[in-house]
Amino acid sequence: MGNTSSMLTQYDIEEVQSHCQDLFEQQEILSLYQRFCQLDRNAKGFISSDEFLSVPEFAMNPLSQRLLKMVDGLNFKDFVAFLSAFSAKASLRQKVKLIFQVYDSDGNGKVSSKDIMEVLRDLSGTFMSDEQREQVLSQVLKEAGYTNDSYLTLEDFIKVFGSCKPEMDVEIPVD
């Protein structure tokens, strides 16, 4: 599986399925492998930041720099594991965990109001002032029972997102 020019064996497919809690069918894994090989232009067995940025939808995403920290250097198995959160079969916890990781850019397991402000800034660009972002953040935190001084954990994110189901489903085209 390390050499992208080779084909996946049945064992490789089952290993990837197991690694991803069987969220993808075999045909979907084969399609993802083809896409992985297209992105891994130098057949190194992993995808670099530059290769991810070659996907226009990824490059245009306002959170692309945060996402790059999460995906740079992924091998195929980890690439599929990353995409698992976008499966229609993924649990709320799996989806919220990915969202949490986007906010927790330093990986310390806690999200501060500063972390949230940075994401809001990335998402809103020049459409909102820092003052407007502060007001939105304070209101959202207050409604969720937190303050600007609170540090949110993954469990807090699950509690907050538990009332709404994040729509992150992406269909994997199968040939």
Image (tube, helix red, strand yellow):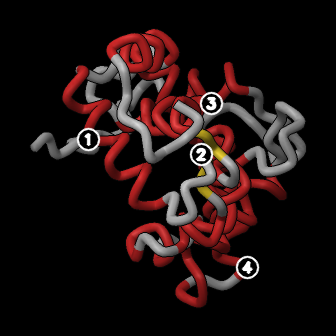
Q: Secondary structure at mark 2?
A: loop
Q: Within 10 Å of the Cα at label 1, are there few (<14), some (14-19), or many (20+) other Cα atoms?
A: some
Q: Position of residue 98 (x, y in %)?
A: 57, 37
Of marks 4 and 2, which one's residue comes earlier in the chain? 2
Q: Within 10 Å of the Cα at label 3, are there few (<14), some (14-19), or many (20+) other Cα atoms?
A: some
Please indicate, yes or no, whether residue 105 appears anywhere in the rendered image. yes
Residue 130, numbered label: 4
Mark 3, residue position: 157
Nearest the viewer among 106 and 111 is 106
Q: Nearer the viewer, mark 4 or mark 1?
A: 1
Q: CA distance from mark 2 to mark 3?
A: 33 Å
Q: Position of residue 100 (x, y in %)?
A: 65, 38
Nearest the viewer among 162 and 167 is 167
Q: CA distance from mark 2 to mark 1?
A: 16 Å
Going by the numbered disc 4, the residue's amino acid type is Asp
Going by the numbered disc 2, the residue's amino acid type is Gly
Nearest the viewer among 85 and 120 is 85
**Residue at point 74% right, 65% down?**
118
Does 139 sit left or right of 117 as displayed? left
**Residue at point 72% right, 67% down?**
134
Mark 1, residue position: 31
Going by the numbered disc 1, the residue's amino acid type is Ser
Q: CA distance from mark 4 to mark 2?
A: 42 Å
**Residue at point 40% right, 76% down?**
56
Marks 3 and 1 close (CB-CB < 8 Å) = no
Mark 2, residue position: 45
